[in-house]
Image (tube, grey):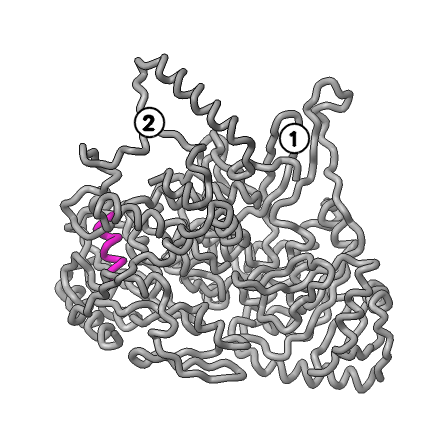
Amino acid sequence: MNFITIDKSNWTKGIEKSRETYQIFGPVEDKNGCRIEPLEAGVQPIMDADVTVMSPKSVLFPQTETILTADLDESKDDHHIMKRAKQQYTPRAVLGIRPYDARAIQLVKLNFDNPDYQDPYWCDAYEATTFVGLGVNRPGPCDFSTSTGCGPFSEEGLDVLLADLDDRYLAKVLTPKGEAWAAACGFDAGADAKESQALFDILRKEAEKNISTDLAFDKLAQKSILDLYEAPFWDDVAFSCINCGTCTYVCPTCWCFDIQDETKHKKAARFRIWDTCMSPLFTSHASGHNPRESKVHRVRQRFMHKLKYFVDKYDQGIMCVGCGRCVASCPVNIDIREVCKTMNNYEKK
Amino acid sequence: MDTCIEKIKAICTDLFSKGEVEKVIGFAGGSIPMATRPIAVTSEADVEKLVFNAFCGLNLANYVTKNNLPKDGAKIAVVAKGCDARNLVTHMVENQVPRDQVYIIGVPCTGMADKRRIAQRFEDEITQCTQDGDTFTVTSALQQEVIAKKDVLRHNCQYCTHRNPPVYDVMAGEPVEEQILDQPFPDVDHIASMDPETRWDHFAELTKNCIRCYACRNACPLCYCPTCFVDESSPQWVGKGQDETDITTFHFLRAFHCAGRCTDCGACVEACPMGINVRDFTRKLNKDALDLFGWEAGMDLDRRPPLDVYSPDDPDDFIK
Amino acid sequence: MMGNLLEHMGVDRNRLHFSWISSAEATKFVDVVKEISDKVRALGTTKKFAKDYTK
């Protein structure tokens, strides 16, 4: 593990140089807000952007991804045989993501890369990706990442962690992937490890002071699933919900998807798209029966999955990294912090 | 407007003490700056939770649907701005809810603030926002600003000509003066002045960030279909991915389903997480409804909507 | 109003056609379909509201 100083006047040159090896992703701002996107040559990531509305999960798990294709031309030997769609998995670097988003990717990894199943699309993309995070000097009012096992300068899941020091970045290189990225950028001005670590510690402490939410979920694991499931507060939690999919789409840890087939003339494609447990269609059976018929069921499912089922299944804390995107984007201000508190404090009478 | 809330609370307390309504649908304070949350108040003790400010931008008629009404015929009360009340009238005209089951607490409205316009004035995230009459004091870690509401008014509120509810049971304040506009649809006229290719590009650019969360649809009181056309699986009318044709199809058809029904309440835009002004679609329909039929939705309980009735005078030069 | 909105969105009005045809007017239906087909064919292909499956 070593530290590098990157003078900001060299930053752009280094990034452009790294394009010889890497496809670059990063925050972009346009009139519609901020999101993480692939950046064309010459387009720079906006490092001082506010929290992006959309998380970087799309780098590994695009909202629409063609996974299989087939030729329907019966004169061909391999007609109607589904084959893996051709995708590029050349090295890519995601710049300027927030540390909690890197942890989120580690949580999503539990689903796509585990002993039982390795999703080839997600795993190949993950292998190809270098995550360059930027510590958050001034967390906003929705940020509660210190409560969820990460924080504004968390290193989990990152290959490089940058700290913004006005005229320069201090980079903490955490993995061989990170070393390769720094080398490809030509960033090689070493910094004293002890001093640098001390600086990181100061910045982290300063940043953490801005986070006022102290979220407790310590009692969730001990609670009975059925008690929480049947708790009386769900109607109140769900009342204002309009059942849009915003919270699940902006969430960096929501991984549910749907599979769709489309054909035209002699071509067929199967693709996967994000799905949302907020939609009635998510659980609609072919018979017409829907086990989660009302919005209360669906709202309960979202929070039970994140704050109870996940806790029980993986023993990795809650399925939330405290980015606050759902809190900020929810049209009706449903706040996961409040729901978590309600669930954690609930005692069946 | 800030005195309204005291009147709203007094009215609600009175309604509960007389047992006239089962619940009141209104707004409660939010957990973050510039947010409010729709709430159903069911007892006198909870009336204190109600708020009314310039961030009550959703449409509460959305919470008054056939399935949400008490089955025993009991009344519910709704806190309604001009647009909310017009959408309640639309519900009644479309036979969704009976007039006698809804008690409308009318609020004379001077417009809602555009959160995005306020946020744009700040380099970093807003940590606090307080409203005092028609000004806001907005604070972030780096700056503090005092902002006049008129400078950050939502676009639909700038062009609103029905700030007072046309139908109500009680008013929570003196009616406010209605705006008289020389040009009620400058945004529609502006798009119309472009050539067709530019218009197409305008709408493509507008919807390119759409994530298909359907917040616009779900925030809209008009969208009460049991199953929306985009959620149908057999037949599947429209693809579900991020294809631009599918996205455009969704927005075009969603808008057209609101033809002659939309009150331009702006809830769709308020709800959109990506800041897309989907009103660019519906405003054209509102303009046509006014130009072709002299119609504004939700003004009258006794008049049928133009697309609901046939009249020999209907324009028909498009039929060949 | 639907035609107006489509036109507002940049779709060529000549590609839209509204006719009132009774179920008994088979010949009128055939004539109208022929007429529209010829007219639209003459306008050429469009990418508007035409999904590109090659992506």
The percent position of residue A72, horizontal first and vertical second, equals 68, 24
**What are the residue bounds of the magenta stretch?**
B79-90
Please identify the quarter of the rendering in which residue B25 is found.
bottom left
The percent position of residue A125, horizontal first and vertical second, equals 74, 51
Looking at the picture, tell me which residue is in the foreground, A313 or B249.
B249
Q: In which quarter of the image is the N terminus of chain B?
A: bottom left
- Dot 1, how many residues are within 10 Å of its Cα: few (below 14), some (14-19), or many (20+)? some
| Marker disc for residue B320 | 2
The percent position of residue C47, horizontal first and vertical second, equals 56, 38
Name the residue rendered at 43%, 43% in the picture: B252
Name the residue rendered at 25%, 49% in the picture: B290
From the image, state whether disc 2 or disc 1 is nearer to you.
Answer: 2
Name the residue rendered at 35%, 46% in the picture: B223
Name the residue rendered at 20%, 45% in the picture: B93
The percent position of residue A7, horizontal first and vertical second, equals 78, 79
Tag 2's secondary structure?
loop
